[in-house]
Image (tube, helix red, strand yellow):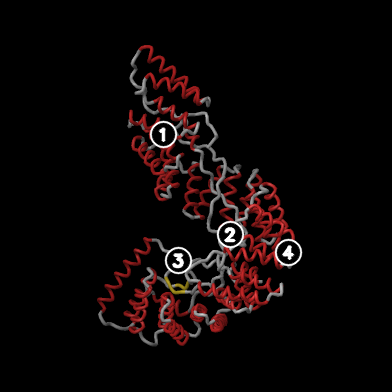
Amino acid sequence: MTKKIRHIVLIACALLCSLGGQAQLNTDRLTAIGRNALYFEDYVLAIQYFNQVIRLKPYLVEPYQLRAISKVQLEDWEGALEDCNRAIEINPFIASLYYTRGFIYRQLEQWPAAEQDFTSALRITPRNRTYVALRADVRMRMDSLALAQEDLDLLLEETPDQVDLLHDKAVLYIRQQDTIRAIEYLERVVEKRPNEPENWSILGTLYLMSENEQEALRCLNQAIENGSEWAGDYVNRGIVSYKRHDYKTALSDYDKAVRIAPKDVQCHYNRALLLQEVGDYNRALEEYNRVIALSPQSYEMYYNRGLVRMQLMQWQKALQDLEITIKHYPYFMPAYYLASQAKIQLGDFRGAQQYRDRAYQLDRKKTTNHIYPSPRTDVDIAQKTPQERDRRREFSVRQAQDIDEPESKYESAWRGTVQNRYQDVQLEPNIELGYYAASKELRQTNYTHPTLEELNRRNVLNAPLRFSPREVQLTPEILDQHFQTIAQLTETINAMASTVGEAAMMAYMSRALEEAQVRDYASAVDDCTRAIRAGGDDSPVMALLYLLRADLRAKLKKEIDITLRDYDEVIRRDPTLSIAYYNKANLLYENKDYEGAIRLYTKALEIDPDMAEAYLNRGLTYIYIDKVKAGLQDLSSAGERGIYQAYHLISRFR
């Protein structure tokens, strides 16, 4: 940090006992002159005066600390640390000494030492708000987020509307990836400081990442009206217009962003993507050329440029770009497909087949549970976090008072997960039974069934069952509850001895579901088998039990034939259960029976014509066997029904 401040920390302790005489007068006067020089930012001169005091009275605490503060302003961290250590040796019971040293450790990024010093200061002065605020800051840097939250909550209890604390709480929730709570606190910040564009910028970014375009536009407009000079505000506002297909307005904002930051890769990339979208391929090519010139190691841009060159029929240059893409993203199958097309256009049919063969061989080597990196081809949101506060402002004569100075800048970018950013060509997973349902976004798939509804109405399980297309990550606390429930069910089952019938069937099914939650799939399969044996053959629940066992066996990836027989039994018992056809189709796809998978996806869609996952998976299967036209139609249907990643796939495979 280079910005200097006028004020300094004053020592909280009383003056030491007067020794009388001329020496006392001289040291008092020298200290006063040094403090005055420090106040007026004449740091070198201040140090000279404190040196004289230390030579005369090396047992005094005050000159060491004031000299340390002078060195802080000159960014002599090590020298300042040495002075603090000496002062603490003289008197270890002064809170402000630990505060000063903690600040230095913080500047040196020695976070544990800084936290320890702020804690030591608080032991002496427990209610000092500045110490608590700085400790919260350090704890966030250490990723001790729970402890940091305790500190911030303590401060907010006394002053719930203090803007700096609301700001810090927003930063904390961003670090915890809790976008909803971060937005809540930033809304309170902008309400109290409506004229600061930085707060509107980050709030607009968070809304955009949450796909709330209307609120994002409101905040970004406000940031720009308040004089924002950050190019990212124009980039993000352009993205909103882009998503709304208002390409003219989007291009205008991207142009402004480029004028503000002509060397910003992100600005040029988004503008290139838009030009590509509207078919202005020559200008798009110029933009991608700039992006690659500015950042030659942004290898994903070569794929984008290759797409544009394919449109411009620059087959050889497109092939060069695609080769670079394949080198850095060897499992990205669309690059092989396009390279094959380029080879065909160049008349090299043998070379085209070689690309297809390479893709096939690589795809066979892929593990089904691994995500392979792929080039990004979606818009890139400009991300920011609220600025790390310049804590030197807090070294002031008001050290024991509340600090409420405005935040100034947002300089560092925040990296989150952008929704719908394409990673790899992967099928949608099975739709499975469980107690938890992940967000289905806007998908139109029917995630229920009369048999499931009837079972839930009977209230014979620990909680209502649901169909969900995605696994939900459970916290350690929730997992522990499931383990406890398993133990309780085991006691119940043991007490039942060899009892059969409805009660036994539901007990085993309940334990199987609990075991599935804690990923003990083998035990869950065994309990499903016991439930099937205990229950009546005519029970409508039996179809769900076979489906549960089939899905669990599919996770174990063993005994494929037995798993397929379970799916067949589900279909025999309840041919209206579309999810059984869909899940079985996924298993057939994994085992390279693509035609069989297509037939089952089709059957699932006959039962549930809005099953978005079946459209996407059938579309990818069609494309995999080179029925591209049919595949693109299915991807379009999947997109219409809420799987927006499908549109990105369409642009790659078209």
x 49%, y 34%: residue: 75
Label 2 environment density (alpha carbons within 10 Å; few <14, some 14–19, many ≥20): some
CB contact under 8 Å: marks 1 and 4? no
Q: Amino acid at mark 3?
A: Val
Q: Amino acid at mark 1?
A: Leu
Q: Which residue is mark 4?
A: 279
Which label's residue is closer to the chain start, 1 or 3?
A: 1
Q: Residues within 10 Å of mark 3 (few under 14, many from 20)?
A: some
Q: Which mark is residue 472?
A: 3
- Compared across the picture, whether 562 is left or right of 653 comes to left
Q: Sequence-wise, which precedes: disc 2 or disc 4? A: 2
Labels 2 and 1 touching (C-beta < 8 A): no
| Residue at mark 2 | 211
Callout 4 amino acid: Gly
The Cα atoms of the two marked residues, 1 and 4, are separated by 61 Å
* Mark 1 residue element: helix
The relative height of residue 264 versus residue 511 in the rendered view (above or below) is above
